[in-house]
Amino acid sequence: MDMTENLRPSGAHPTDQDPTSYPYASSYGTAYDSAPGGYPPPPAYAPTTGRRKAKRPVALLAAVAIAAGVIGGGTATLVGQLNGQNSAATGSGGAVNGTTVSQSSKGTVAGVAEAVSPAIVEIGAASSAGKSTGSGVVITEDGEIVTNNHVISGAQQIEVTLSTGRTYTADVVGTDPDKDLALIKLRNASGLKTATLGDSSKVKVGEQVVAIGSPEGLTGTVTSGIVSALDRDVTVAKDDSGGSGQGQGQGQGGQGGGQEWPFEFGGQQFNGDTGEETTTYKALQTDASLNPGNSGGALINMDGEIIGINSAMYAPSSSAAGSGSSAGSVGLGFAIPVNTLKADLDTLRAGNGS
């Protein structure tokens, strides 16, 4: 049967080809009583010129195409705010406004990467032990950046590189070693692209996520995966005295090879000795590829909202005694839930910490 066939009773509605075929099509309802079948007249409309409505099969195909685009999603950036409805994105210290992606890119990895990447930075922290590389997330236009405490702990100088390649000097505003969080601020910055902080309490196992950071100093690297588990206990050193160098980054300045941030998971130590001063937090587990240098970067949902701050990775081969290698990702990464960050923002902004 022809899908474009008109199944309504004859005379029930006008057609595009002949809008005057029925009494009520050419007037404003005056011929209602004489309309065949007793159907009420449609609203008056202005005749179109030179354009015809898409036939039903075309409309159906368009709907299928849109549905397929959503289902096949990879990542979209900061899409959650497309309609201007910003969910709670900060602690009580004030709103954190983020960028958005176009509706056509919603739910895709490419869309998320395009929208969120400008808000992810590379952090170079120099100390007496050398220099390490980590990542950070811009949360205000004037340059407030969230990262891991272990990325900047003990740093004598901090240099931040934006996705555009522009560099800034940054100062530490506040740290919270117990939560492995830190807030730094760029000097003389304005008009920066910012990220939108989501709600990690709504995260479910199996949801697709995107990670953006600077693994091994490769700025703006994008990987994707899913949330593998919730509430994993991860133990990390409180400062850079853990034994394997400062930060989960690319060791330089005589350290010889990459140095990974030490942490404990499942009763075992990875990436070196965690030292005596440690803290444990509940983490999101993801199989999105994380490597040294991803620490402090963003774990993002498909609405383009930050749901976690990447903080640790499982790398069994580098935990062997005397090993100086930087093992790559094996699909076990961990991120601090963004709600932990939002609850701590006021404390970090006040320059306080636990």
Image (cartoon, rainbow, N blue to C red):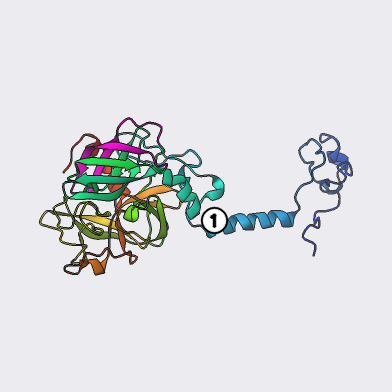
Name the image quarter holding the N terminus: bottom right
Q: x%, y% of residue 209?
A: 41, 56
Q: Does residue 258 sit above or below 101 in this rendering?
A: below
Q: Secondary structure at mark 1?
A: helix
Q: x%, y% of residue 167?
A: 34, 39
Q: Residue at x 18, y 38 (%)?
A: 352
Residue under label 1 = 70
Residue placed farthest to the left in the image? Answer: 276
Q: Does residue 332 sit above or below 347 in this rendering?
A: below
Name the image quarter holding the C terminus: top left
Q: Nearer the viewer, residue 311 or 301?
A: 311
Left or right of residue 83, residue 148 in this image: left
Q: Quadrant of residue 255?
A: bottom left
Q: Quadrant of residue 330?
A: bottom left
Q: Residue at x 41, y 47 (%)?
A: 305
Q: x%, y% of residue 158?
A: 25, 41
The kind of residue tagged 1 is: Val
Q: Quadrant of residue 146?
A: top left
Instruction: Say whether residue 176 is magenta.
Output: yes
Q: How many marks?
A: 1
Instruction: Say whether residue 115 is magenta.
Output: no
Q: Please give the range of residues in magenta.
A: 164-192
Q: Residue at x 40, y 53 (%)?
A: 221
Res 116 visible: yes
Near mark 1 (Cα within 10 A), the count class, few <14, some 14-19 or many ≥20, is: some
Res 92 visible: no
Q: x%, y% of residue 95?
A: 36, 35
Q: Nearer the viewer, residue 284 or 25?
A: 284
